[in-house]
Image: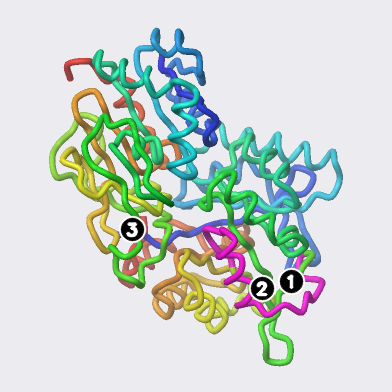
């Protein structure tokens, strides 16, 4: 039986892992290579590297780190952050990424999804959406959650899948950093709307939040989190044991 | 030396890194002489079947693969590389494969229950209808990483399956021709042990 995936997300800036609360107030946590190795040896099913560097130098440093991670760690690696063109796909895929996550780049140019899916296959293209409730509607936000695009989230995700996205990451800005659980209402809506796997992000504060996620939305494929893993509040082997005790199939 | 066939499809970085990690001598190549001189061949691949089959044919590697297979050289197809070993695929049309194994590759959509997500992405448990040396250090229920939307439906050479609403063909073997639908180079220690078994494969094993 297919297992539910637990995915730590590593935000990387200037070669170090950082994690913000509600996308602000970033603090340095650890070395990406060490952390990646630790996670892969401790039950992580996949890793997401998010490049939040803006400079050219920082970007080169990021791909060096990615190459180092990919040559010693043999689980799926997804890379996101600053992916605006097919050339950006090339750059990270050549360094060992398996999947590439697009967000603002796809909002600016939705055809990037189609172009990348045609060139590398849908399995390679992950559409990541930062979503927030505005006057009762789910809206897509761009630029790390700072800018309301005005787009209706479910429609945007449907379109992304039509264009060729093979997987969706739903990050609820409303629950991100709050640590009171995933945004089950939002996730349920997305899961019903698309056929491709949906990954939940934003809001995990305890192992109980993952149990509730997978129990209440059986179609969710994976749960993603950062700080609770980086700060040791939840350790993945214990989390998986608890999930198993709750009859949720894990590796 | 193991030749990783480079016909312009997919990401070979992880595959060559994992073989290097195992201490195997491997080379990414499209050179016919190197491929003919190699002890073993790996046929990788991601993306669409039609595109990959066309590139394989245009590069002339299809004929070399058939010749080397006939000579008994161990060949491992991975993911789309496994699907290419079959006679044909119905992915976005109808395309001819290498025909080294009998059977065809068909969409999972319409075959698996509707609430199952497509693509089949993630870690799924392996089951073994029969023992095979490729899995000699792998146990029933060990998980490996899958990413695919099409599968080999009617193969007589299945050596491993994974349950995803139906029994999905996870690995096939007929003599020296082998294939994994999953990605051993992305499947942690279990995947590495499968690659090691292929590296250590002896002609008469």
SS label for mark 1: loop
Q: Which dot marks residue A22?
A: 1
Q: Residue furthest left?
A: B130
Q: Which residue is mark 2?
A: A176
Q: CA distance from mark 1 to mark 2?
A: 6 Å
Q: Are marks 1 and 2 in contact (CB under 8 Å)?
A: yes
Q: Which dot marks residue A150?
A: none
Q: What chain does mark 2 sit on?
A: A
Give, as a single range, the part of the protein colored magenta: A144-169
SS label for mark 3: loop
Question: Circle 3: is it few (<14), some (14-19), or many (20+) Cα within 10 Å?
Answer: many
Q: Earlier in the sequence, mark 1 or mark 2?
A: 1
| Residue B47 percent across, percent down from the top left | 49, 44
Q: What chain does mark 1 sit on?
A: A
Q: Residue B122 occupies which quadrant of the picture?
A: bottom left
| Residue B180 percent across, percent down from the top left | 32, 38
SS label for mark 2: loop
Mark whose residue sits in front, 1 or 3 = 3
């Amino acid at each position: 039986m297919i297992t539910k995936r637990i995915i730590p997300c590593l935000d990387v800036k200037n070669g170090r892992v950082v994690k913000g609360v509600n996308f602000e107030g970033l603090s340095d946590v650890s070395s990406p290579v060490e952390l990646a190795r630790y996670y892969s040896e401790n039950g992580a099913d996949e890793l997401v590297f998010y490049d939040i560097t803006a400079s050219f130098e920082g970007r080169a440093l990021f791909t060096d780190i990615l190459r180092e991670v990919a040559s010693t760690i043999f689980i799926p690696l997804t890379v996101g952050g600053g992916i605006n063109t097919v050339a950006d796909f090339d750059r990270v895929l050549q360094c060992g990424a398996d999947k590439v996550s697009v967000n603002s780049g796809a909002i600016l140019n939705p055809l990037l999804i189609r172009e990348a899916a045609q060139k590398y296959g849908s399995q390679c293209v992950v559409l990541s959406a930062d979503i927030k409730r505005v006057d009762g509607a789910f809206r897509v936000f761009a630029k790390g959650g700072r800018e309301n695009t005005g787009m209706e989230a479910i429609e945007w995700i449907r379109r992304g899948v039509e264009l060729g996205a093979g997987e969706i990451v739903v990050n609820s800005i409303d629950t991100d950093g709050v640590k009171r659980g995933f945004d089950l209402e939002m996730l349920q809506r997305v899961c019903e709307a698309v056929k491709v796997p949906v990954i939940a992000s934003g809001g995990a504060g305890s192992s109980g939040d993952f149990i509730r996620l997978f129990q209440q939305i059986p179609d969710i494929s994976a749960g993603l989190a950062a700080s609770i893993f980086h700060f040791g509040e939840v350790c993945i082997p214990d989390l998986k044991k608890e999930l198993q005790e709750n009859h949720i199939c894990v590796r | 030396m193991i030749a990783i066939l480079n016909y312009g499809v997919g990401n070979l970085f992880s595959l060559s890194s994992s073989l290097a990690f195992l201490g195997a001598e491997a080379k990414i190549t499209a050179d016919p002489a190197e491929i003919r001189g190699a002890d073993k061949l790996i046929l990788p691949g991601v993306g669409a079947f039609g595109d990959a089959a066309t590139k394989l044919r245009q590069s002339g590697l299809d004929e070399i693969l058939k010749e080397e297979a006939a000579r008994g050289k161990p060949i491992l197809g991975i993911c789309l590389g496994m699907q290419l070993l079959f006679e044909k695929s119905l992915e976005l049309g109808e395309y001819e494969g290498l025909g080294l194994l009998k059977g065809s590759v068909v969409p999972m959509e319409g075959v698996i229950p509707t609430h199952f997500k497509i693509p089949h992405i993630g870690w799924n448990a392996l089951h073994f209808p029969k023992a095979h040396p490729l899995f000699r250090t792998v146990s029933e229920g060990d998980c490996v990483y899958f990413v695919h939307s099409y599968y080999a439906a009617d193969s007589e050479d299945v050596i491993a399956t994974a349950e995803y609403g139906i029994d999905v063909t996870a690995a096939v073997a007929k003599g020296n021709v082998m294939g994994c639908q999953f990605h051993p180079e992305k499947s942690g220690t279990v995947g590495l042990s499968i690659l090691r078994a292929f590296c250590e494969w002896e002609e008469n094993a």
